[in-house]
Amino acid sequence: KNEVEQSPQNLTAQEGEFITINCSYSVGISALHWLQQHPGGGIVSLFMLSSGKKKHGRLIATINIQEKHSSLHITASHPRDSAVYICAVSIQGAQKLVFGQGTRLTINP
Amino acid sequence: KAGVTQTPRYLIKTRGQQVTLSCSPISGHRSVSWYQQTPGQGLQFLFEYFSETQRNKGNFPGRFSGRQFSNSRSEMNVSTLELGDSALYLCASSPGSTLLGAFFGQGTRLTVV
């Protein structure tokens, strides 16, 4: 079993829909990251969370440390949000990131 | 300020050759970590350097090595290339002694033929 599991693996929605991507992990972490990867490979760090909730524009990320679960929400989704969204955790006590397999999001106009 | 810069962006090598990839972190960042991304395995951690010292290494064979210079720039070397080494290699830099606030480069796409 992977240490970081994301769901769904693929998600297709219509423009304007509310999107939720989930991430569960099984290890102790010092932080959780949400990353966005567009075609071509470049990765952008969207959020880094160690507790609670963060909001940036139409993006919201939450984390529940007790349940070892995080969600990334996109409100009023737009075709430019189409990308792969990756959850990654910083392992407690170790200087490395462990990644989920990613969620491929496609927003149709 | 400038982002994380990886060079080259694209590279084609033949089996058995070696390759060196470069990563220049954001100015002031002292930690550089390297990752391999393949369609089958996703993103996997290779190693992490802080102040010229390797602090952690992922589960990769000894053909994969790296180093960090005093200006925090890092290089990754892969010797005796195999077809399975074809991947996108990403580096990330962060300001302090942890991976908090990591910024990623655009990656080097390596194709081994």
Image (cartoon, rainbow, N blue to C red):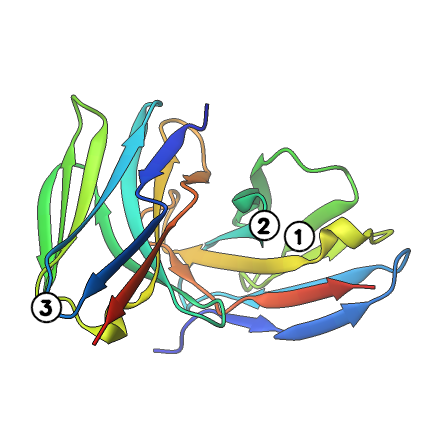
In the image, is residue B8 above or below residue A56? below
Q: Is residue A27 left or right of residue B41?
A: left
Question: Measuring 26% from the left and 75% from the top, which residue is drawn there?
Answer: A80
In the image, is residue B1 above or below residue A94? below
| Type of amino acid under label 3 | Gly
Q: Which element type, helix, strand or loop, lies under badge 1?
A: strand
> Which chain is disc 1 placed on?
B
Identify the residue position indicated by label 3 in the image.
A16
Q: CA distance from mark 2 to mark 1?
A: 7 Å
Residue B106: give x, y in percent of width and height. 49, 70
Q: CA distance from mark 1 to mark 3?
A: 46 Å
Residue A83: give x, y in percent of width and height. 34, 64
| Type of amino acid under label 1 | Arg
**Residue B22: quadrant of the picture:** bottom right
Identify the residue position indicated by label 2 in the image.
B52
Is residue A100 among the parts visible in the rendering? yes
| Type of amino acid under label 2 | Glu
User: In terms of depth relative to the viewer, which is nearer, A78 or B17?
Assistant: A78
Q: Are marks 2 and 1 on the same chain?
A: yes
> Which chain is disc 2 placed on?
B
Q: Quadrant of the N terminus of chain B?
A: bottom left
Q: Which element type, helix, strand or loop, lies under badge 3?
A: loop
Identify the residue position indicated by label 1 in the image.
B67
Q: Is residue A105 left or right of residue B108?
A: left
CB under 8 Å between callouts 1 and 3? no
